[in-house]
Image (tube, grey):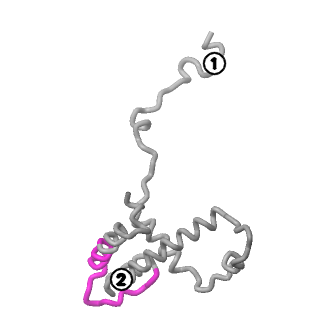
Amino acid sequence: MTTASLGFFAGSNLRRAPKAAVSQSTVRTVDPYAECMACWVDYMRMPNLDLTPRSMKLVGDALPDVDVHDAQYIADLRMGESVNAMVDSLVMQHRWAIYKSQGIASAWRFPNARYEDVLLEARDELEKKLRTNVATRLYWA
């Protein structure tokens, strides 16, 4: 009775997936450092004059418009601003290495220092600051 009702699903047409394919996790984890850096790069590339209608609203507007995309954009910019403060607190070589690694600066201005070594040091120091900052520490939780 069941084979008649299933029609073409019965018998040899049903195949099992290989065990290796089923056991693989499809959840991708995001690197918190890369996510913070992406928000910081967006913040750094943002034009200085924000003349969007969102910034031109009067304070006395009765009902504020809530847009999910705008709210996420503002949250990302605030995180970028806090990452910018932490990058600015680094020493000059480390700051310049972070700028170059994210494409904000194009030249390496320190001929006596090896860029790759300074970048590793800068990333370690910046990640320590990002892990302890109130605005960014939740990404490592």
Q: What residue did someone put label 1 on?
A: 6
Q: Helix, strand, or loop for circle 1? A: helix
Q: Quadrant of residue 138?
A: bottom left
Which residue occupies the foreground of this view, 113 or 67?
67
**Few, some or many C-alpha atoms within 10 Å of disc 1 (few <14, some 14-19, many ≥20)?**
few
Q: Is residue 21 above or below residue 128?
A: above
Res 47 seen here: yes
Residue at 70% across / 68% down in the picture?
A: 64
Which residue occupies the foreground of this view, 128 or 93?
128
Residue at 65% across / 13% down in the picture?
A: 4
Horizontal side of 104 relative to 122 (left or right) equals: right
Give coordinates of residue 34: x percent, y percent. Answer: 42, 66
Give coordinates of residue 22: x percent, y percent. Answer: 43, 36
**Of callouts 2 and 1, which one flags the residue occurring earlier in the amino acid sequence?**
1
Provide the residue span drawn in magenta: 104-124
Q: Is residue 106 magenta?
A: yes
Dot in front, 2 or 1: 2
* The N terminus: image quadrant: top right
Q: What residue did someone put label 2 on?
A: 89
